[in-house]
Amino acid sequence: MRSQHTQLLILLLSLALFGACASDKKKPSPIATTVSQIQKNLSSLAIAYSNKDENGFFGGLDPSSDALDLVRTRTLRDFEHFNSSEIAFVLERVEAEAGRLKTVVRWKGVWVQKLNVSSIEKRGKAIFFWNDASDPKMIEVRGDSPFGVFR
């Protein structure tokens, strides 16, 4: 009888351990989710910029941010001057500040001008600020902005 109790106990412990190992996958942390969303938004901005998609590009910017007025003006000027472009971003760091997120990015871009067959290649490092929301929108750019190459 004692061995039956021991076997039952071992079986219950085994089931408990197996059940613990088979639990649902952990959800990503809120910061991991935010970083992932910022990476998506950076990619969407780059694609919209390259396609000269004003609605797509400006949709990634916070419309209430006065700090982006120069970015908006220079981006429209860029759209008038290039045939094609490609920008790649590398996200180096994300920091949460009071009511906003700060990202440090390295970027590399190539622009082919309308009136010239040659291309312009540039690299830079910028700080992008985002509103702290579930779908972060850019609110400010500092440093070497990839938007506004044709000044």
Image (cartoon, helix red, strand yellow):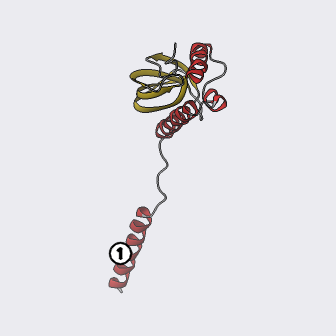
Residue corresponding to mark 1 = 10
Q: Is residue 9 above or below residue 135?
A: below
Side (left or right) of 24 relative to 123 = right
The N terminus lies in which quarter of the figure? bottom left
Q: Residue sitting at 57 percent across and 16 percent down?
A: 74
Q: Residue furthest bottom?
A: 1
**Quadrant in the picture for residue 134:** top right
Q: Is residue 41 above or below residue 143?
A: below
Q: Residue sitting at 44 percent across and 64 percent down?
A: 22
Q: Position of residue 100 (x, y in %)?
A: 53, 23
Choose between 28 and 102: the one closer to the eye. Answer: 102
Q: Label 1: how many residues lie within 10 Å, few (<14), some (14-19) or many (20+)?
A: few
Q: Residue sitting at 53 percent across and 22 percent down?
A: 115
Choose between 112 and 71: the one closer to the eye. Answer: 112
Q: Name the residue type under label 1.
A: Ile
Q: Position of residue 36 (x, y in %)?
A: 49, 39
Q: Position of residue 9 (x, y in %)?
A: 38, 75
Q: Is residue 71 above or below residue 133?
A: above
Q: Position of residue 17 (x, y in %)?
A: 39, 66
Q: Is residue 147 above or below residue 45?
A: above
**Quadrant in the picture for residue 55:** top right
Choose between 76 and 42: the one closer to the eye. Answer: 76
Side (left or right) of 20 relative to 136 = left
Side (left or right) of 58 relative to 17 = right
Please, what secondary structure does the residue beneath circle 1 have? helix
Choose between 49 and 133: the one closer to the eye. Answer: 49
**Count of marks overlaid on the render:** 1
Q: Residue sitting at 44 percent across and 33 percent down?
A: 88
**Quadrant in the picture for residue 135:** top right
